[in-house]
Amino acid sequence: MHCPEQYIKDNGIQRRNARYISNIYIEKMVWKSNEIVLDLGCGPGDVTSDILYPFLKNKINQLVGVDKSIEMVEFAKKTYGCSEMDFKVLDIENAHDCSFHSHRFNKIFSFFCFHWVQNKVDSLLNMHLMLKSGGEILVNFLLIDPLAELYECMDTEWQIYIKDIKQRYSRFTIHHSRDEIKDIFTKAGFRVINIESSVKKYTFPDFSSFLSTIKPVDVMYSILPQHLHDRYSMHVKDTICERQIMVQICPITGETIMAYLPITVHAVKD
């Protein structure tokens, strides 16, 4: 992710999803006094501060947000950092990074992040390592990332830039069953308490609002030379409209509806 200011401005889906999941699951968890909680993939920190922390403030000692993006973490620290909330750079796929937090956390939350992770089993093993015995995780992510479909439709001139991205995303286009997802978590040592998944829809007031939402999470902007950004943006717009992928656009109102498939896993480290 990049452009933290724009991401915060246009992350309505992420905020709605995090609030919905937190409202359902947090009260189902077992809480003790002075817990330390991790928010994995915190991005610019607004969901950590505005949504997760209000649910947890009377239950915990500290909330730590982590993200692999230095830009996002620096923004989160500057904007939301305080004695109750700290933000750090951490790559969940890096076992060495995670070993510094062995058996530190009572709970680990992650919203709309885990679909970016390539090696999910090893990342879950790292989460298992960072969690105390009896600790719980709540992971909410996209079962199929809409950007995968977009990358598959890119014209030839962009293929040189997205070759590695396409290889990575090709694995996300396969629809995993609930049993397969459960197996991934079980292999990492977790006991799965609940899994739920259903198609959701989010309505944008217009197509431009939708484009503004996907831009901060499109890694192509981190790869492309700056002088190609505008042309790439136009190609994204034209590709989505011409191929009618990712969204449905109302011809009368211009409202743009995106369907997406999130999955939520609640599990415990026995």
Image (tube, grey):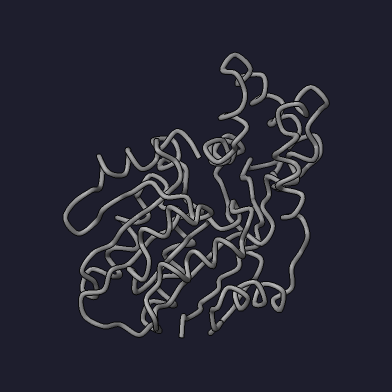
Horizontal side of 216 relative to 260 (left or right) equals left
Q: Is residue 75 left or right of residue 174?
A: left
Image location (x, y in percent) of residue 51: 34, 60
Where is 175 relative to 177, above or below?
Answer: above
User: Where residue 241 appears, x then y in whole percent?
Assistant: 75, 35
Residue drawn at x 36%, y 62% as measured from the top left: 101
User: Observer-nearest residue: 269 or 111?
Assistant: 269
Dividing the picture into quarters, in which one does residue 9 lie?
A: top left
Q: Residue at x 35, y 85 (%)?
A: 30
Number of marks present in the image shown: 0
- Residue farthest to the left, as pictured: 83
**Residue at 69% from the left image edge and 76% from the top image edge:** 178
Q: Is residue 243 above or below residue 17?
A: above
Q: Position of 250 compared to 209: left or right?
A: right
Front residue of this view, candidates 258 and 236: 236
In the depicted view, which residue is nearer to us: 74 or 217? 74
Q: Return the x and y of residue 115 as percentages of the image width and height.
A: 61, 56
Q: Quick one: 213 or 229, which is closer to the camera? A: 229
**Quadrant in the picture for residue 237:** top right
Q: Residue at x 47, y 47 (%)?
A: 11
Task: Tell which residue pokes out farthest to the top in this image.
Answer: 227
Q: Is residue 244 above or below residue 22?
A: above
